[in-house]
Amino acid sequence: MRLWGEKPYRSLDYHLRERYGEKIYKVSLNGGMTCPNRDGTLGSRGCIFCSAGGSGDFAGDAAMSVTEQIEEQKAGISGKFPARHFIAYFQAYTNTYAPVGYLERIFTEALAHPDVVGLSIGTRPDCLPDDVLELLTALNREKPVSVELGLQTIHEETAAFIRRGYPLSCFTEAAERLRGAGLEVVVHTILGLPGESKKDVLQTMQYLNSRDIQGIKLQLLHVLKGTDLAGYYASPGFHVLNREEYIDMVICCLESLSPDITIHRLTGDGPKELLIAPLWSMRKREVLNRIHHEMKMRQTWQGRCFTGKE
């Protein structure tokens, strides 16, 4: 069995230790932006699963400066762990959805912090105009910059249902442009989307194997209060993955993914005060331990079924 550190998959912790020679932590920041799915450009209610925090429920306070947010997040992490260096992660909403002058100011402020070793930017593939790409390319010459793209699924029917707001071709083009500029690409996917089978999910993994991506997040579908998904959840026949189903699906995804792709996440954190289902997901450490145990029992690892890029 191939191991990355002590895990049968290429974890983000392994990747960062390999790059920086030490444990690196993320500080989650809020750039005070919105999203074309919320401001009326494409829609006003966001994706059906998106809470009021715009996927940034754990990010900093947008009323604070970037430096103040970093210091506050550092203090929280350093109170628990011997943290020395950090990646500045702009997480809330769409973090390239603003004038390039504003983006330059906040991204440069983050990278200028002496304890920040890199930048991670969560955004949409339809929000990467040429001037923003030029900015990210320039910043990447100073410290490593990765761009996290919300794909969720390759299936257009599902994408329309969740109100993603762009076709797969838009993602494909954005990923190619980012890689052409030398930027790392991390892709967000959601397991357990309504109507999707394990076969559908594995087709998404196979598609991503054929793309030049460096990382992936495997996110469990959370049903949160205040989202349109919560209304669907109340309808008869709505299925949310149980823990065993999710663990099996994650392992199948890992087996099919290229061993060169870094696994940034295997589950996710739903805010406890907002989470409706699945409640078992609140025990994140227990879920991760079960995934590791089951992979050991199956004697399997990331890439075991990978047959090469198509």
Image (cartoon, grey):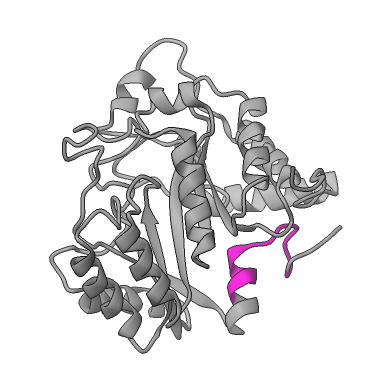
Over which residues does the magenta segment extend? 5-16
Residue 282 visible in image:
no
- Tell me what residue is drawn at x 28 percent, y 34 percent: 225
Q: Is residue 67 above or below residue 256?
A: below
Front residue of this view, candidates 184 and 169: 169
Q: Residue furthest left?
A: 63
- Tell me what residue is drawn at x 70 percent, y 43 percent: 251
Front residue of this view, candidates 205 and 130: 130
Q: Residue furthest top?
A: 236
Front residue of this view, candidates 154 and 68: 154
**The stretch drawn in magenta includes residue 29:** no
Image quadrant of residue 126? top left
Image quadrant of residue 298? top right
Percent position (x, y) of residue 81? 47, 78
Percent position (x, y) of residue 4? 74, 66
Quarter of the image with the C terminus is top right
Percent position (x, y) of residue 274? 30, 40
Q: Is residue 116 above or below residue 133?
A: below
Taking the image as shown, residue 267 lies to the left or right of residue 307, namely left
